[in-house]
Amino acid sequence: MIKLLSLIFLILLLIVGKKRGFKTFITFYLSIFLIMMYLTFMKTGLNAIFLAIIICLLATLVTLFILNGSNVKTKSSFISIVFVLLLVTIITVFIGNSANIQGFSLESIESIGYYSHDINYDMTNVIIGMYLICTIGTIIDTSISISSAMYEVHENNPQLNKKELFVSGMNVGKDILSTTINTLYFALISSFIGFFMWFYSVSFDFLSVSKSFDQNIIQLLLSFIASIMIIPITSYISSIMIMKNKK
């Protein structure tokens, strides 16, 4: 069934996206490969946060430059994503060291008996790495959307100065923001329905002490924060690089 769905996915991409659709298919599976590499290297004992940053940067390079080529749009977007990724890493590490986010939740009690208790790995770092990887997708999408729109605005209105170009980027970002936040929210809730059903059979009072609930809410809020920060940073960096490229 997975092979059949993958084939349908590829056919639809080729029909609708043609050459770009094929590139999308390639980048999707390269992203899967990067996640597998992340898990493989993590098993060797390397720091999960460091690995997550590397994987996020590689995923950004793959997504931006294979799909959009090497141009001022992708370069400004990549620089913006690097800045936001560093800021989100600092925030996430602070949260990870301040909150009790590691370990298994109450609803996992029955399943953890099957796992090895001799993991010998800092699970806080694993959770932080997971947060970073979960966040990178949304900031890539938002950043390239803004930089591409700003480039088109500049192409059609070359008389705009850097400040006016920045304002146009912010306006595009504001339009994208509400859709992005709603998408993130519904993606989390849809994957969380089973969790809520588990608590429905127990008591919703457990939500206040559920580690899994806290982990997912923190992940959602970090994604919200990253989605907001990428807008002014991409708008500012893109306005500088587009105007510089004009000269």
Image (cartoon, rainbow, N blue to C red):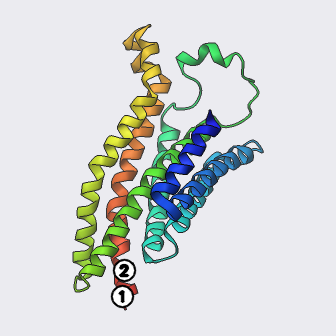
Q: Quadrant of the C terminus?
A: bottom left
Residue 75 point in image, percent of width and height: 48, 73
Q: Residue at x 50, y 61 (%)?
A: 18
Residue 125 point in image, percent of width and height: 60, 41
Q: Which residue is mark 2?
A: 242
Q: Which residue is mark 1?
A: 246
Q: Residue at x 74, y 31 (%)?
A: 119
Q: Quadrant of the N terminus?
A: top right
The residue carrying pointer 2 sits among few (fewer than 14), some (14 to 19) or many (20 or more) residues within 10 Å by Cα, namely many
Identify whether 103 is placed above or below 169. Answer: above
Q: Amino acid at mark 2?
A: Ile
Q: Residue at x 38, y 41 (%)?
A: 184
Identify whether 59 is placed above or below 114. Answer: below
Residue placed most toward the observer, 95 or 30: 30
Instruction: Identify the secondary structure beneath mark 2.
Output: helix
Residue placed most toward the observer, 66 or 146: 66
Q: How far apart are the two marked residues, 1 and 2, measured between alpha carbons?
A: 6 Å
Instruction: Identify the secondary structure beneath mark 1.
Output: helix
The residue carrying pointer 1 sits among few (fewer than 14), some (14 to 19) or many (20 or more) residues within 10 Å by Cα, namely few
